[in-house]
Amino acid sequence: MLLSIPFPPLPSPPSWFPGHMNRFTKQLPALLSRTDIVLELRDSRLPLTSINHNFEGAIRKWRAERGKVTYSSQPLRGAAVESSPVSGYGGMTCERIIVLNKRDLVPEWGMEPFRRAMASRFPEQIIHFASCNRREDIKSLSALLVNIAKRNPHATETNVLVVGMPNVGKSTLLNSLRNFGIAGRTPKALQTSSQPGHTRALSNRLKLSEDPLVYSFDTPGVMLPFLGRGDEGAERGVKLALIGESSSSNCLTELHANLITAGIKEGLYDVEALVAYLLYRLNVLHPVSPAYLKVLPPGTAPTPSVSIFLEQLARRLGMLLRGGECDTTRAAKWFVEWWRREGGLFSAAAPHALPSAVAITGSQGQQPQPGRGSVVRRGWGFDLEWSVEQGDFVPDVAVSILEHRMGECIDEFVERTQEYDRQGGTVSQTQEKKRTWEEKLAQRAAKSKAKFIARKKGF
């Protein structure tokens, strides 16, 4: 068992914010004015990192115009705003549903505690775990949309706007909802792709239900313009890169030269940097028997070393160069592909009990404590991690304790995000220069206008 799991050095995050994302961000307030339900998709493995904070301001204003108040005591950005009700496009319906997609890739025992922790902090958000290949999840989500539509019988139709980061499964989910909600044979209405950025424009209206009438729009996935500075931004970028769809159609038999990432375009990350963080995270989730041991020779011990791990994996797979040297680059690509296809499932099904203490050096400067034999680290997904006293609880039954632990992680994330934003950590140097230049242009335009008015009055 690992006694120390150091946090790996990570590269600076790349920036990927093409023009169609910028256009949609500007269109969002107008689209919300004729929207009744916002369906925001996030990844279950990254329930906090996959939040796009750029949506928050527009959604908060939309709720205020519908007479709703954001009751969260710690909003992600800014304070709650209240205004007089304004008639909406389909009446006064105003709901925000957070769909945590790919639920089959996180342990079942953490779903209800996380849902309860989020509900206590963001009561205006409906949390729904789903996986597009689980019919019962699609059925319950479809029923939720229909029940919301039936609350306002005077509205002729209910409109749903689907938003989220690139490649979190928006188009796939809408196709599944349409197949379930419309009787008879329904052809695939929206094209899907494992490549982020496939949807580049607002789709035509898609009917999800006939009685009552429910329509939806598919939207382009929108990435953050800048992922952040320092370790915070570096970790956010690697997390988003790791949760992508597999690029191979044949399970574990084909390797593509580039990897398809979830929110970040392929080729912007070195694959070995992804392996370093993945190895760290899997060791944290279960330091006794990490999921990656299933692809190593029997009897291999867990390791925090990327070079040792990749050499072991390359020899196990027979990935050798001339002279018997290990092809670690090819092994690294194989490992990321394996985790996206099968390893996530193994990790989600990892046993709960940890026999002794594990010291972890995390991204926030946590230091190992080898003398405390009763303290262990636990994790759920890639965003939540906490310390517990060994033997304090069994995750299956102590939902309230898990809810408290996860709530602390959420509060810490919110506070850290707000502080980071206040310090300007979410604005790149290029954005700062652009903003300064725009302010100068605005000042020049104001001076020119004032001079023109002054000359006109002189005549």
Image (tube, rainbow, N blue to C red):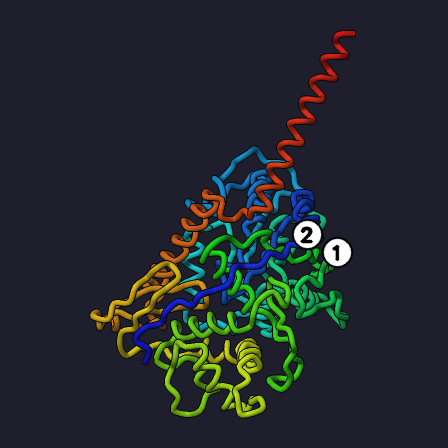
Q: Which residue is mark 1?
A: 205
Q: Mark 1: which amino acid?
A: Arg
Query: Which percent across, then down, holds residue 332?
Result: 54, 78
Going from N to C along the chain, the mark reached first, 1 or 2, is 2
Circles 1 and 2: CB atoms closer than 8 Å:
yes
Q: Is residue 2 left or right of residue 309?
A: left
- Most extreme residue toward the right is 459
Residue placed furthest toward the left: 371
Q: Nearer the viewer, residue 104 or 266?
A: 266
Residue 165: tell me if it is visible.
yes
Residues 80 and 291: in front is 291
- The residue sitting at 52% across, 88% down in the picture is 325
When the figure is inspected, residue 168 is found, relative to residue 438, above or below; the finding is below
- Distance, label 1 to label 2, CA atoms, is 9 Å
Q: Quadrant of the C terminus?
A: top right
Q: Secondary structure at mark 1?
A: loop
Choose between 15 and 182: the one closer to the eye: 15
How packed is label 2: few (under 14 Cα within 10 Å), some, or many (20 or more)? many
Which of the 4 image quarters holds residue 30? top right
At which x and y percent is residue 333? 57, 78
Q: Is residue 34 visible?
A: no
Q: Is residue 439 above or below residue 405?
A: above
Residue tagged by mark 2?
Answer: 159
* Left or right placement of residue 143 versus residue 421 in this view: right
**Above or below for 262 versus 62:** below
